[in-house]
Image (cartoon, rainbow, N blue to C red):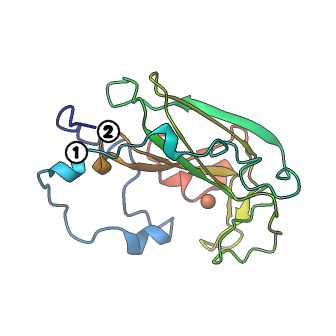
Amino acid sequence: MTPQAEFHQRDRDLHPPAYTPGYKTSVLRSPRIPLWSLQNSLSEVTGPIFSPGELGPLDNDLVLNYAKQGEAIGEQTIVHGYVLDGNSQPVANTLVEVWQANAGGRYRHRNDTYIAPIDPNFGGCGRMLTDERGYYFFRTIKPGAYPFRNRINSWRPAHIHFSVFGTGFAQRLITQMYFEGDPLIPHDSIIATIPDK
Ligand SMILES: [Fe+2]
């Protein structure tokens, strides 16, 4: 994609602060010195360009895209939405990537040692391109909650991780979605870092 315009400055008040000791991991991942503002280079304000031909037909179907001898176990759901820019305009043809734990709360990752079993028919990754309205959808199973080492008895609510590209690499946003009504949400140390309730 060609650069449309200079990027909108990200509104830092809408995003959680980088340093939030209640979420232990943020302590070592946050900068210790003030940020420097740099002029964007061409490689940051252009691309990435993805075409439908690069995606597989089941890339947005997590129930089937890793299935061997049956479907993924769990409550099936269709997640859908729109990618909009800072002016609420649709971002067309942009890549949305998702990853998540299985119905028992276990990731297919070597560093995940939680006792919940791996689902042989569930990989936990998907991707799709938005249409001209910025719309995307994917089918999956509702992920399970899992414990994490933040404090004693700390559990993540069910969630799906998202990566959203805008019209340039420097706009990439990593975020998570949750399921309304999940009783673990008010107790989550990561959600608690968001200043605007
Ligand atoms: Fe997660």
Q: Is residue 134 above or below residue 108?
A: above
Q: Relative to residue 82, is residue 97 depicted above or below?
A: below
Residue 38, quarter of picture: bottom left
Task: Tell me the element at label 1.
Answer: helix
**Which of the pair 11/77 is nearer the observer?**
77
In the image: residue 179, left or right of residue 31:
right
The one nearer the camera, 9 or 125, is 125
Mark 1 beta carbon near ligand 1 (under 8 Å):
no
Task: Give the farthest residue toward the front.
Answer: 53
Circle 2 sits on which residue? Answer: 167
Q: What residue type is labelled 1?
A: Val
Residue 134 spot, x, y in % from top left: 46, 27
Q: In which quarter of the image is ligand 1?
A: bottom right
Residue at horizontal 69 percent and vertical 37 percent from the top: 180
**Residue at the image position 72 percent from the left and 69 percent from the top:** 153
Q: Position of residue 42 (x, y in %)?
A: 16, 49
Choose between 77 and 188: the one closer to the eye: 77
Assess whether mark 2 and mark 1 are in contact (beta carbons under 8 angstroms): yes
Read off the residue under disc 1: 45
